[in-house]
Amino acid sequence: MRTFNAFLFIALLILTHAPPVACAEGISVSLAVDPAPLHDQVHAYSNYTFRVSVTNAGVASVAGEPLNATSQITYTGRVMVSLRLTIRGRGSYDFGNSTTGYTTLPLEDVEFSIAIALPVNGTKSDVFFNYVFTKDAYDYGLKPYEDAEVTVKAVAYFEVYEAAEDPGNPFRGPKAGEASTVLKLLDEMKIDYVEGKLQEIAEELGPLRSFPRPGHVNVEAFLGLLEAMNASVMGGDYFVALDTYQRYDEDRRADLIGALVREANTSSTRALKIQELELQVSQLGAQINRLVTLHELELEQLQARYAALSQTYQLKQAELEEAKQSLTTAITAVFLASIAFFFIGRRSALGGILGFRRSQGG
């Protein structure tokens, strides 16, 4: 661990003053980062300001006052404000069906500190520490799928000294308060890696959008992973996007492969059934064609018979018409003959009668 005092730009701001309060309630410490990290990500090769706020909520400490009635340790009336940044690598690996995480030893461990006057009761003092992240994850020997985790811890200690010693040699006493936050170190290699993995699962899962009525593949769940990772990348949250990819890579990809195998088996069974149905349809089609051919032959025969019968009918009809014409002619002739005979008969009879009458008269 390295301690920086003289080489760090520190701005100390005492905001307000108020009369001390006798009752001790405690010191609170808060921590803020500027610029505010998006999704708790700090960028490599960038400068950040860490503001440590020390608030006195009821502690009244007087210089020279011992810690307690029997202690030889004495307060100086100040607090020592410390800011410590520790960078570690973090990742996970699989063995069998299990996954375990790991954390490296500190890759960077720096501490800044300064002593300030204890804020008056009811007031707050802000201390600013500037820090530049001069390395990226690759410089620390990490792989793109590993995270560079930055733990920032701010602690306020009561400054004390030995009563029998020179007050000019103070040291850290009891802890007065602390605050901490965990950040992730983001670099261009991480960004490129995550965006490449997004493209990878997009190529794997994108085709599921046109998957026809799957029976075994949970399309909505897999597309949900893809959309979640894409939303994280679009929002700049690369570490959450990487977590989504790793969840897919370690668990869901195997589920997808298994589901696709089952879907393929089902599709194969369906294909065989379709082939059977197609064969049956083909056979039925052949039978229909044979029946159609047979019926066409029968139809041709019936048409031929119909034509023959029609021709016969027409001949008979012609003969009938001829016979009717002959009969009509014969009837007419008979009728005319009858009339002729009738008139001839009457004439002969009339002639006889007239002749007879003449004879009698002569």
Image: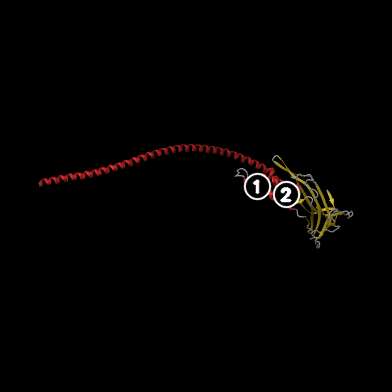
Q: Quadrant of residue 73?
A: bottom right
Q: Measuring from the top left, give residue 208's x and y in whole percent.
A: 64, 45
Callout 1 amino acid: Leu
SS for dot 1 = helix
Alpha carbon separation for disc pair 2 and 1: 19 Å
Mark number, residue 238 = 2
| Mark 1 crowd level (few <14, some 14–19, many ≥20, 10 Å Cα) | some
SS for dot 2 = helix
Q: Nearer the viewer, residue 94 or 22?
A: 94
Residue at left 12%, top 46%? 358
Q: Going by the image, does 269 lie left or right of 339? A: right
Residue at left 71%, top 42%? 99
Q: Measuring from the top left, give residue 185's x and y in whole percent.
A: 77, 49
Residue at left 26%, top 43%? 333
Q: Which residue is mark 1?
A: 223
Mark number, residue 28 = none
Tag 2 and tag 1, C-beta contact below 8 Å: no
Q: Quadrant of residue 30?
A: bottom right
Q: Nearer the viewer, residue 139 or 148?
A: 139
Residue 13 in view, yes or no: yes
Callout 2 amino acid: Tyr
N-term-proximal mark, 2 vs 1: 1
Q: Nearer the viewer, residue 172 or 15?
A: 15
Residue 73 in view, yes or no: no
Q: Residue furthest front?
A: 362
Q: Measuring from the top left, give residue 80's x and y in whole percent.
A: 83, 54
Q: Quadrant of residue 159?
A: bottom right
Above or below — where is 133 with respect to 276? below
| Mark 2 crowd level (few <14, some 14–19, many ≥20, 10 Å Cα) | many
